[in-house]
Every structure is written in C-alpha cells, then in structure tokens.
Image (tube, coloured by chain):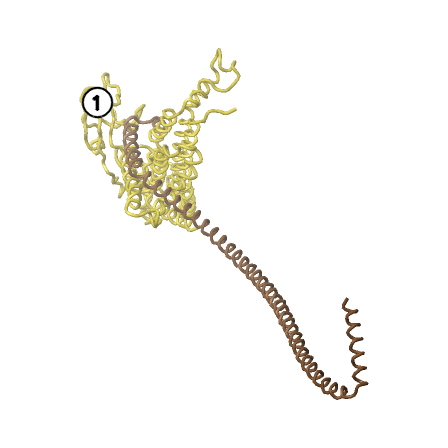
Chain colours: A yellow, B brown
Amino acid sequence: MRIFKLILVISLAFSVVQSGAVDYSSGMAAGVRRYSAAAERGWTSPAPDRQPVITDTPATDEVDLDMDEYLYGHVRDSYEWHITTINGKPVSIPLPVIVISKAGSGAHIFSSKHLEEGEYKGFSIATSGKYENKIVEKGSGGTQVRPWDFSITKNVLGLMINSALLLLIVLGTARWYRKHDATEEAPTGGAGIMEMMVSMVEDDIIKDCVGEDYKRYSPYLLTAFFFIFINNLMGIVPFFPGGANITGNIAVTLVLALFTFFTVNIFGNKHYWKDILWPEVPTWLKVPIPLMPLIEIIGMFTKPFSLMVRLFANILAGHFMILGVIAVIFLTAKMGAAVNGGLTVVAVILGVFMDCLELLVAFIQAYVFTMLSAVFIGLSRPKAETD
Amino acid sequence: MSLITPDFGLLVWMTLIFGIVFFVLAKWGFPMITDSVQKRADRINESIAKAREAEEKLRNLASEQEALVEKARKEQAAILKEAASSRDAMIEQAKVQARDEAAKILDQAKVQIAAEKESALRDVRKEVAVLSVAVAEKVLRKDLENDASRDELLGRLVDELSSSKDLNS
C-alpha cells in the first residue's frame, strides 16, 4: 500500500509542476509562447488592461493555440533543450551540433544557438518540407540536402543523462554487494529497492520466459528493463533533466528492438532455424512454394517490429494525452475566468490521473518489452522435440 | 512525418550509449547483484534444509530416548523378576538342604543312640550275668550241701545240655 501512496504523491507533485509551468520543455511554438505569456498577464490582472486580442476577439489566428506545434514540439527531438519561457523570451540550453557536410564543406561542430537566427555556415533548420525541423544545407540547384547529422540533440543528451543515472544507481547497488557479505545481510534503502526489482525481473520474467540457460541473457534483459524504465520515468518528469521524449522516439525503440532481434537470431539454436526453414507442417505447405518458411521468416522481423512500435506508441501516446489534458487550460483561457478556472481544476485532476497512469505505463511497458524479449529468446532455444 | 522516421544520428548515438550501458552493467552491475542474491537464496535454502534435518534429528532423539527409557524399564522389571525368582529358588534350595542336613544329623544321632543303647544293654547284660553267676554260685553252694538236690541238678543240667545240643545241631 505504501508504494501506491508514494506513486500518488509523486504524480501529484509532477502534475502541479506541469500545470504551473506548462511551457516546460522545448519545441513550444512561438504562437504558444506568445499566447501563454499573454494569458498569464490576463490571468493575474483581469478586465481593465487585458489585451483586447484575448478577451473580445476570440477567433483571431493570432492567439489560437497551434495545437499541432504544441503537441509535436513537446514530443519531437530538437537541437536545443528548451526549458521555459520567461516574459516571452525562451530559456533553453543550446546543444552542440555535429554535422558532416554532403556538399563538401567538411565536418562542423558548433553551438545550436547560432541556428536560432537562421543560416550558419550554410546550415539551417528547415521550416518545411521533407526535413522539417532538421538541419539541412543547400545542395546544388538550391535543393535541401540533409548532411550527416550526429548532433547531440535533446534526446541524445537525455539519453546520456538517464544512462549516467542508471549506471550510478546500478553500480552503486553493485558496490553495496562488493562491500558487504550478501549471505550474511540483506541491503536496505536504495540497494534494497534495487535488489527487489532486479529479483522481480529475474525471477518473474527472465527465469520463467527464457528457460534453463537464462543466466546468459539475464544481463541484457535486466539492462533493457532498467534502461527503458528509467527513460520512461524521466520522460514523465516535466522539467530538465527530464521531459525528453526518449522511449517515445522511434529511433530509440528501433535500436532496442534490434538488440533483441540480434540476441534472438545470433544465439538461436539449430532447432530454432529448423522450425523457421523447415517447420513441422504438411509438405505441400513447404514445396514447391515455401509458404510456411516465408511466413516464419516474416515472423522473425515482425516480432522485433512489434516491440519497437509498442514501446514507441505507448510512450508517445502517454505524452500526447498529458499534453492534451494540460492544453485544456490554455484552450479555454479566452472563455472567461469562470470557465477557465473550472476547467483548470478539471485539467489538474485529470493530469494527476494521467500521471499516475503514465507511471503505471512506464513500468508496464518496460516489463512487457523485457518479457517479450525473454519469450522470443526462449523460443529461439527450443529443445529437440521428443516424440 | 518525422515522428515515425528514425533519425540516423540518434540511431548512432542510441546504439553507442545503449551499448556502453549494456557493456558496463553486464560486466560490473547486474551479475554482481544477481549472483549475490542467488548466493543468499542458496544459503537460506541450505539453512532451512539444515534446520529441518536438525529438527528431524531432535525428534528422533526424543523418540530414541523414550525407547531407551522403555527398554530400561523393561529390563529393570525383568531383572527384578529374575531376582525374585532366584531368591525364591535359593530359599527353596536352602530349605531342602537344611532338611536334608537335619535328616542326616538325625539319622546319625539315631544310629549313635542305637549303638549307645546296645553297648549299655551289653554292659547291663554282662553285669546281670556276673551277678546271676555269683547268685547262682551262692545258691548252688547252698543247694549242693544236700545230696538230693545235687542229683536233681545234675540231671537237669544234663538235660539242658543235651537239648541245647539238639537245638544247635
């Protein structure tokens, strides 16, 4: 019961912070920034000096919340880490841009703040087209060319921070075991929680799903679980260094899925390959048209694909839902104080609920990814069928 | 749409970062924890097994003890019984022996008494014989002073002698 109370309290704290400083992370569109700053002014000092744009002309394009930009701005990767906006001025951490030109100007490393004004050394952030919000350079004939882009983006920095945190936590726990005789005493505090979680993953997921030689795979599966879990959790934290939508990014989940894919297929035994290439089905399903082998080979790829999409879509959807709930506050600002106030309360309550849900999802998705990886690994090591 | 197209740079960074994290944790992180937990679990299982064994042993010991006491009691009873019977036998034997001994002594005494009586009788007889001879001498001396009685006596003696001769032959 205590752990639920803890979760509730944490989510409440997150929600309050989110609704208070909704403009918490990067990618907030200029329109939204203007809008929220204006709304703030309108909220603190009502009627007399309220800007006419907000009060009396609700339908102008000027103040309409650009919902797409608001939502996608929060969940996509970016070249700077936007933290908040004070008095209409964005406060953000510029990140290093590392690009290798395809047009022939070589490699460049520079701060992303140079790109705010527009073009820098021939590079600029595309505002539209195929490479929207990505760094492009001008190619021959005025076309946009995407250079090799190894920038430390918001997601890369987030990954680094979260990984460092994970290393700190796990190695700190391992250090406890190095310093103590684990057969004589059990850890308490942080190490105790980690031991509980590691044991839970190992006993409930890895041992059950992989089978007898689980020890070989347990480091990978444990790393995957805690990596996903900490990135999910940090994604819910609404301010720096959290808030980056890491596990809701398809590149990140693609790499995780690829790791599982290679683990499954490199260490799969001969029975696994026989089941794929010559499964136990009526022969006419295998020759002359290798129907079943074809399906099995497609299955090899759909399994990690489903892992990738499941994690990506769940986390992304969670971010969208929380953003949507918070957006209610700003969408209703022009409807007057009473409506806006009432809906703000509703939004905060819903926000608390969504954050609780996301905490649950953060755990469940890490659990599911690890469990399915373990199941796929277990399936890749079948024993010879005994008739 | 950029949301569902993986960015190449992020792919590279993610592979690198996850690879490093995986390598470090797989080498120095998780095996340490899982092995220690496994070791502790093994130890706990072992301890439980040992405790069960000890308990079993203790229970056996109690029953063994009980059996021992029971056995001792039985033995005690047997010994007592044996002792009683041997005592009875001894008393019986003693009695028999005493009786025999008494009988023997009695017999001896009887024999002796008989012998004493015989010798006493013999002495008396001898005395009586001497006395009667003396008496007879005196009587004879007086009788033989007249002829008639002397003749009669002589005749009787001859008769007696002859009859005793007949008897002896």
Q: As rendered, which of A56 and B145 lies closer to the eye?
A: B145
Q: As rendered, which of A316 and B50 lies closer to the eye?
A: B50
Q: Can residue B94 be seen in this snapshot?
A: yes
Residue visible at 44% across and 36% down in the picture: A208
| Residue lying at the far top of the rendered structure | A288
Q: How many marks?
A: 1
Q: Quadrant of residue A380?
A: top left
Query: Residue B169 location, x and y as percent?
Result: 77, 66
Q: Quadrant of residue A36?
A: top left
Query: Residue A251 location, x and y as percent?
Result: 33, 29
Q: Can residue A37 be seen in this snapshot?
A: no
- Please say if A140 is above or below B27: above
What's the residue type where badge 1 is placed? Ser
Q: As rendered, which of A51 and A350 lies closer to the eye?
A: A350
Q: Quadrant of residue B22?
A: top left
The residue carrying pointer 1 sits among few (fewer than 14), some (14 to 19) or many (20 or more) residues within 10 Å by Cα, namely many
- Please say if A225 is above or below A182: above
| Residue lying at the far front of the rendered structure | B147
Disc 1 target residue = A101
- Write down the chain letter for disc 1: A
Residue visible at 44% across and 20% down in the picture: A274
Q: As rendered, which of A96 and B89 lies closer to the eye?
A: B89
Query: Residue B38 location, x and y as percent?
Result: 37, 42
- Please say if B87 is above or below A127: below
